Image (tube, coloured by chain):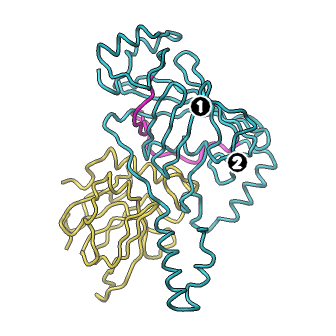
Amino acid sequence: MNLLSNARVATLAALTLVAFGSSAALAHHSAAMYDFTKNVWVAGVVKDVRVINPHMTLTLAVANGRGEPHDIQFEGHSVNNFYRAGWRPGLVKVGDRIKVRYNPRKDGHDGGFVNGFVAANGQEVAFRIPGAEGAGTPPGGTRAR
Amino acid sequence: MGRHDRLPESVWQRGGVRLWAAAAAALCSLSMPCGAAIGAEAHPDFSGVWTWYIAPGQSPLPRGRGPALPFTALAKQKVDAYQSLVRGTSDNPGAHCLGSGMPASMLFSGGYPMEIVQHHDLILVIYEAWTEIRQLYLADKIIPASDRIPDRNGYSTARWDGDTLIVETTALKEQEDQTYPHSAQARILERYHLARGPKGEQLLINDWTLTDPLFYTRPVTGEKKWALDPKGILLPYECNEEAWLDHLEALRKAKDEPGKGRTAAATGAYP
C-alpha cells in the first residue's frame, strides 16, 4: 500500500488544513505554529491517543539521543479526516509502536501536527500535502519497528 | 439517469429555459426518482453531497493571503483588537467547537463535504464541519425580518431566477473572528448555478457578494466552486464531547479531592 494513496480525500484534507490559516474552518487551531511545508517522521510507543474533533491528540514515548524514552505531545487531524484517510476505531491503541508523520512546530519544540502514521499492524493512514518535503515513504520502510 | 445526474449541459447552457410540471413528470417516469425535492415548477436540483473543486492545473494550495480587504477604520480597529487578543494563542472559534458562521461556513466547506437537501420551499445546506446547518427559505416559509433571530450564519431567504438560486443572508451577528469579518448589518448575496467541469464533472458555482458599509468601503466579491461527490456521505462531527468529559472530570476532582478541580468545575462552560 502506498502511503500516499487515497490521494483525493487526503488532498482535500490537507487543503482544508492549510488553506484557512488562522481563521480556519478546518485548521481549527491557529495553523501559524506549524510548518506545513515540512514533514518529519518519528517512531514511538503510544501512551495516549484520542481521535476526537476538532483535533486528535497523541502522546508518544520516543527514545531520545541516549535511548531514553521521553513523551512528545502531538495534535492532528479530526476524526472525520482520519476516517476518510482510512483510520478505523481500534487501529491505534495505547502500547502500540507506531510511526508518525507530522508537520513540526516552527518554534523548534517537540511535537507537531500529525498528518499520517503507520499503525502497529502496518496499515498506513496518510494525508497528502502536495509539494511538501518528505511526503513519501517513511524511513525504514512502512512497517513500524 | 441516476439520482445525482442532472439535466444535459445543453439545457443548463440555454439560460432561461424552464421545465414545467409536464416535463418534470416525464423525466420522473422515464428515468429519475422524483420526490418532495421536485416542485411543480422544475428547478435545477442541487441535492447531493458536494466537495471541494480544484480545476485542472490550479494550485491546490493558496498562494499568499490575497489582496487586503477594504476595511473601514471601524472594522480595522475591531479586527485588530480581536487579532491582538488571540495572537500567540491557538484560539479561534473552531478550536472551541463553534461553527464558522457566514461566509466562512460556506467558503470553507468542501474540505469537509456539504450536503444539500432541496425542497420546493426550503433548501437545507449541511456543512459537515461542526454540523453547521443553513436553512434557505423560499416563498411562504420566509418570516418577517423583525422576527429573525440574529445568528452567526444569519437568516437566509432564497428565490429562483431562471436556473440560478439567489440567496440573501441577513440577521448576522457581528463577527471579527471571520476570514471576512463583518458587522451585524452585513448582507451576503449568493448566486448558485450548476455547470460542467472540463472533464464533465458536475459543478456547483456560487458567485457571492458581501456588502457591509460599516466594515467595508466597497462590496467584497468571490466565487466558490464545488464538485458533486455521487457516493459521498456526511460523517457525524461531534466536537463538544471532550469538553463535557473534561468538565465531568473536574467535577469528580472537586468532589473527591476538595480544593482540586474546584475552579475548573465551577467555571465550566456548561449550565
Q: Is residue A103 visible?
A: no
Seen at 39% across and 45% down, the residue is B234
For the C terminus of chain B, the quadrant is bottom right
Of residue A112 and residue A64, the one placed in the foreground of this image is: A112
Q: Is residue B198 left or right of residue B123?
A: left
Q: Which residue is mark 1?
A: B137
In the rendered image of this protein, which colour is used for chain B? cyan
- Residue B35 appears left or right of B187: left
Q: Secondary structure at mark 1?
A: strand
Q: Are marks 2 and 1 on the same chain?
A: yes
- Per the rendered image, the range of residues in magenta is B45-69
Query: What is the chief secondary structure element of the magenta stretch?
Result: loop
Report which quarter residue B159 is drawn in. top right
* Residue displayed at 25% across by 50% down: A5
Which residue is label 2 attached to?
Answer: B173
Earlier sequence position, callout 2 versus callout 1: 1
Image quadrant assignment for residue A117: bottom left
The local crowd at label 1, few if under 14, some if 14 to 19, many if 20 or more residues have their Cα within 10 Å, is many
Instruction: Using the image as rendered, state which of residue A71 and residue B150 is in the foreground.
Output: B150
> Image height check: is B82 above or below B211?
below
Circle 2 Cα neighbour tier, 10 Å, few/some/many (<14 / 14–19 / ≥20)? some
* Residue A18, x across and y down, in percent: 47, 53
Q: Amino acid at mark 2?
A: Lys
